[in-house]
Image (spheres, rainbow, N blue to C red):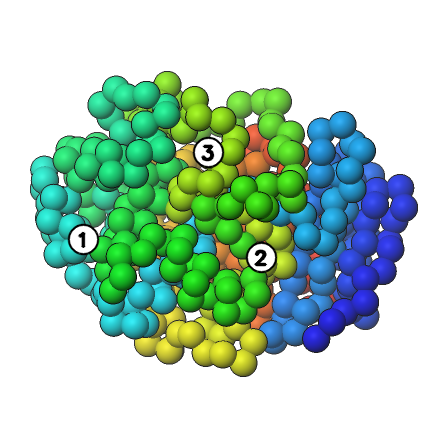
Amino acid sequence: MKTEMKKYSDTYNVAGYVETTFEPVQEAFVANFADGLEAGAGFCVYKGGKLVIDLIGGIKDRRGDTPWEINTVVPVFSTTKAVAAIVIAWLVEQDRVDYEQTVASLWPEFSAHGKGDLTIAQVLSHQAGLSGITEPMQAEDWFDWDEICACLAAQKPIWPPGTRSGYHPLSFGFLAGEIARRADAQNRTLGTILREDICAQENIDFHLGTPQSEHDRIAALHKPRALSDFGEINPATKAAFLQKWSSPGGRGATAWREAEFAGANGHGTAKSLARLMRLALDGHIGTTRYFSETTLDALLKERISGPDLVLPFNLSFAAGLMRNTPNHFYGPNAETLGHSGWGGSCAFADRKAGVTCAYVMNKQSHSLLGDARPLRLIDVLYKCL
C-alpha cells in the first residue's frame, strides 16, 4: 500500500507520512532538528502490520547541500545485531540449527580452551568470553573472515564462558556469521541469506555487505565529538573497544561498506529495519509467515541478565536481541526486544503493543545506549498509542 508523502518542515527538510493521532511524533521529530541534535535522520513505526509513521529529514552529506531522501541509507552499527539474530532464527525455523546445540557441533575448532559446551544461544547472548581479539593484530585483519574466525575459535575466553554477559561489539558478527554459514545448506554467508531469503522476497532495502552500486545513497556520518563512558575498564572492555586493533581500519570506506560485519555494518533505512523487526513481533512480513510460535518463543526467551562486563549497564539478552528490562530504552513494556547501535540508531519489536519501530541517523552521539533523540520520539509515540 502506497502512502502519500507530505512536507512537514521546509527549514529542516522534514517529510513523510504520519497517520492521524500520531502528529505529536512528527512534532518531536522536527524538534530534534530545531534543537540542533540532528544532521539527517529517519523514524518509522508499524502498528499491527500497518505503516503509521514514516519520517525523514535533514541532510545526508557533511556540507549540508544534499537533502536526506526516502531512499537514503545509513550504517546502523550494532542495530545490525537484531537483523543477524533474525537470520539465525530463520535457520532455526528451517531446522538447520537449534539454539540449544553447541557451537562446536557445527564448528569443531571452536571447542578450544573450554568453549566446547557453549550453545548457540549463549554465544548470541554475549556469553562466549570473546568480546574482542586478545592477541595483537592489525586493524585491517578484520577484513579477513577466515583469519578472524580462526582467531576466535582458538582464543582462550576472557572470562569463564557461560557465566556472565560481556558485550561483543564486533566479534559477535563473526561468531553469528560463521554459525550461519556452517548451518546453511549452501554455506552462504549471513548477509547472502538475508538478501536472498528475506530482503529480496519482500523488497526490503537493508544490506549486509553493501554493494558499490548502492554507495551513492549512503549518508555521510558526523562522528561524535566526545568519548563514550565505558565505566570501569576491565580486560573484557579493553579487548572489545580499547585496543589499537579493536575495530576495522586501514582499508577505506568502500571496503568497510562491502564487508560483512554482521554485528556492526548493516546499511538501511528506518523503514527497512521496522519491517524486518516484524519478524520478532509475530513472525510475519506482510502476509508471509516466516517464523512459527515455537521459533519466536526460542528467539525471544531471556538467556542471561545482570551487570554486563563490557557495557556499564545491567542488561538482559535474548538470542541476539536486547530485552527492554531493566532499562526501558524501547518504550514502557518490559518484554519489548530490540537493539541499539553506536551513535544512536535503534530498532525494536513490542509484542504487547503490536508495534515495530526504528530510528536511524547520521549525526552520531557518544551515548552507548539510550540516546536522547530516539527516547524523545519513543516517549511521544507511546503517549499517542
Left or right placement of residue 307 versus residue 339 in this view: left
Q: Which residue is mark 3?
A: 255
Give the tally of numbered discs: 3
In which quarter of the view is residue 82 placed?
Answer: bottom left
Mark pair 3, 1: CA separation: 29 Å
| Residue type pointed to by label 3 | Ala
- Give me the disc on residue 103: 1
| SS for dot 2 | loop
Q: Position of residue 183 (x, y in %)?
A: 24, 60
Q: Position of residue 153 (x, y in %)?
A: 17, 39
Q: Position of residue 355 (x, y in %)?
A: 59, 67
Classify 296 as above or below 109. Answer: below
Q: Nearer the viewer, residue 211 or 304?
A: 211
Q: Which residue is mark 2?
A: 205
Disc 2 or disc 3, which is closer to the eye?
3
Mark pair 2, 3: CA separation: 20 Å
Q: Nearer the viewer, residue 255 or 302?
A: 255
Q: Nearer the viewer, residue 104 or 182?
A: 182
Circle 2 Cα neighbour tier, 10 Å, few/some/many (<14 / 14–19 / ≥20) = many
Residue in view at x 28 percent, y 25 percent? 235
| Residue type pointed to by label 1 | Val
Circle 3 Cα neighbour tier, 10 Å, few/some/many (<14 / 14–19 / ≥20) = some
| Residue type pointed to by label 2 | Asp
Of the image marks 1 and 2, the number of the one nearer the N terminus: 1
Left or right placement of residue 200 versus residue 355 in this view: left
In which quarter of the view is residue 330 placed?
Answer: bottom right
Residue in view at x 54 percent, y 47 percent? 267
Residue in view at x 74 percent, y 49 percent? 69
Of the image marks 2 and 3, the number of the one nearer the N terminus: 2
Q: Nearer the viewer, residue 38 or 185?
A: 185
Please state, as top left, top right, bottom left or bottom right, where the N terminus lies in the image.
bottom right
